[in-house]
Image (cartoon, rainbow, N blue to C red):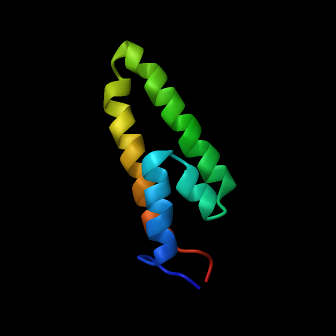
Amino acid sequence: MSGQGSGGNVLAAVCSFFIPGLGQLVQGRIVMAIFFFISMIISWALTWVLIGWVMVPIVYLWCIIDAARYRGDD
């Protein structure tokens, strides 16, 4: 069983740093992985109307923090 701050969460956070959603995929959370990946695609697409420049770092950091703080079902 791995809790917050475990090696698995660190690895997941590093994976999410490189590809948003990959950390959640490593943790076996497929729906959240798809959510974060699509959210980043939408955020980058919205940079054309300027709102994306605010959304990209927010979604990016949220994805990394979510992977690092995840606690599996106890």
Farthest residue in the top direction?
48
> From the viewer's perspective, is residue 61 above or below residue 28?
above
What residue appears at the point 50 percent right and 45 percent down from the top-left corner?
A: 20
Residue 40: percent from the left, percent from the top?
49, 35
Q: Quick one: quadrant of the C terminus? A: bottom right
Residue 12: percent from the left, percent from the top?
50, 62
**Relative depth, front residue between 62 and 19:** 19
**Relative depth, front residue between 58 and 9:** 9
**Which image quarter: residue 1?**
bottom right
Question: Count the marks: how many?
Answer: 0
**Relative depth, front residue between 9 and 55:** 9
Q: Give the side of residue 66 with respect to residue 73, left or right.
A: left
What residue appears at the point 37 percent right and 49 percent down from the top-left corner?
A: 61
What residue appears at the point 49 percent right and 80 percent down from the top-left corner?
A: 3
Residue 27: percent from the left, percent from the top?
61, 65
What residue appears at the point 57 percent right and 57 percent down from the top-left corner?
A: 24
> From the viewer's perspective, is residue 51 above or below residue 39?
above
> From the viewer's perspective, is residue 19 above or below residue 6?
above
Residue 55: percent from the left, percent from the top?
37, 33
> From the viewer's perspective, is residue 2 above or below residue 14?
below
